[in-house]
Image (cartoon, coloured by chain):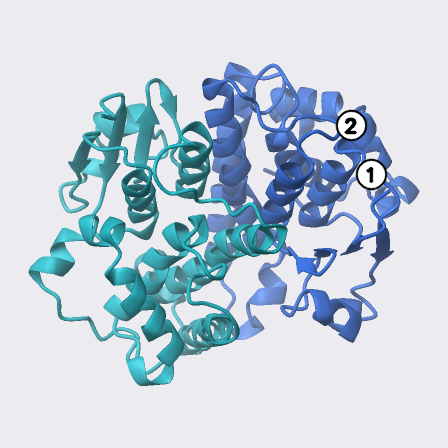
Chain colours: A blue, B cyan
Amino acid sequence: MAKDMTLLWASGSPPCWRIMIVLEEKNLKGYNQKLLSFEKGEHKAKETLEINPRGQVPAFKHGNNAVNESIAACLYLENQFKSNGTNLIPQNAQEQALMYQRTIEILNLQQKIIDVVTYTRRVPEEERHDSAVKRNKDALAAELKIWEGYMQKGGPYMAGKSFSLADAVCFPTIALVFRLGLAQEKYPKLVGYHNLMKERPSVKASWPPHWLENPKPMDMLKDL
Amino acid sequence: MAKDMTLLWASGSPPCWRIMIVLEEKNLKGYNQKLLSFEKGEHKAKETLEINPRGQVPAFKHGNNAVNESIAACLYLENQFKSNGTNLIPQNAQEQALMYQRTIEILNLQQKIIDVVTYTRRVPEEERHDSAVKRNKDALAAELKIWEGYMQKGGPYMAGKSFSLADAVCFPTIALVFRLGLAQEKYPKLVGYHNLMKERPSVKASWPPHWLENPKPMDMLKDL
């Protein structure tokens, strides 16, 4: 039982979901958790700020040790609970190299999704340009093609034959692009990866509740 | 001797410098290395693309294992060469949590530096706005105050009493802001950290050669 851990999270947030998958894979059950509402501003509430002074989710702590950057929390949990559940760091040097590479490289895709999806939230109306919107979309499409290529050459998991930390970290971001309506026919290998991963018990157990309630994808990325 | 490693790098690039500090700390000497010139477009040359298909530096490989994301390469080198030189991952849970947190969290500062410094390179002239320039600078100043606060409460190293992976990863980014002319009097704790770190043998051995040639800071961040 992981009663000495607390996770404040938001439904569908890839950084939160990463930690939840790792907690499942490491058999760390029964941690304190709370689903926050952005609409109610709960990410800026005192309870969140006490763990994560940036007022962001995830807000995660183990005992008194706060680790809020999602990849940092995943690395910490694997290191602290090496012998629990799934071993997330391959010992084979080739697979380990690829695992670390993809685990950090996914931040490129994450940033390009943010650039597209949060444009109107980030950029004041008087500074917006259609040319910037198009450039951001083109950059995201190019990035997605890189990841489609990775799954074409490699797989079935992110770092090769076995599930690893790279899957816990990368899958939530891949799941998000399909949730946002990415055209499935253009990215068949990413679709295959998504289908493989969504059946994994750790992923099923942590599937975003509001995606379960309303499984229909959005249409934000349908023209990508 | 690390004859089975290759690093293609650029002078003053924090991601490249991180790997060089870790190689020094782990006593991995004699690796193949080449200082690339951006002016000559060497980051897009075949030699670079064979290691790093994104055409970016660092381009790093160990044997046939390419690991180009700098934090990934640092994590990989520590894991593969645990018993060499400095142990970069604290065993104490509290220090380890802070080490992983700062190692990933520095990407916030890195991104905000990029937003300010590369604005005219990234944004076409007809899309530029003074209000965006000001917002980017304000965001960078706010981020720098967060890091000044960390060194005020903690230190002397990034994750506490000992040098760790967090220093190898974070220091090059801190060094860059001073190189870009950050006002020293406003950030006394970061100055103290910079002074401590610049005397460390691994840092001295890997100091950017063009900063040695011309030690005068620039003035891009002097009003921050």
Q: Amino acid at mark 2?
A: Lys
In the figure, is residue A116 to the left or right of B147? right
Query: What is the number of the mark on residue A198?
Result: 2
Marks 2 and 1 in Cβ contact (< 8 Å): yes
Q: Nearer the viewer, residue A198 or A181?
A: A198
A28 left or right of B149?
right
What amino acid type should be assigned to the residue bearing mark 1?
A: Trp
Residue under pointer 1: A207
Q: Position of residue A138 (x, y in %)?
A: 49, 42
Q: CA distance from mark 2 to mark 1?
A: 8 Å
Q: Which residue is more in the foreground, A104 or A132?
A: A104
Based on the displayed image, in which of its 4 quarters is residue B174 positioned? Answer: bottom left
Could one spot residue A220 in this view of the protein?
yes
Is residue A219 shown left or right of residue B179?
A: right
Quadrant of the image containing the N terminus of chain B: top left
Q: Position of residue A12 (x, y in %)?
A: 76, 47
Chain of the residue under the numbered disc 2 shown in the image: A
Residue A18 location, quadrant: top right
SS type, badge 1: loop
What residue is at 86 percent from the left and 35 percent from the top?
A205
Viewer-closest of A49 and B30: B30
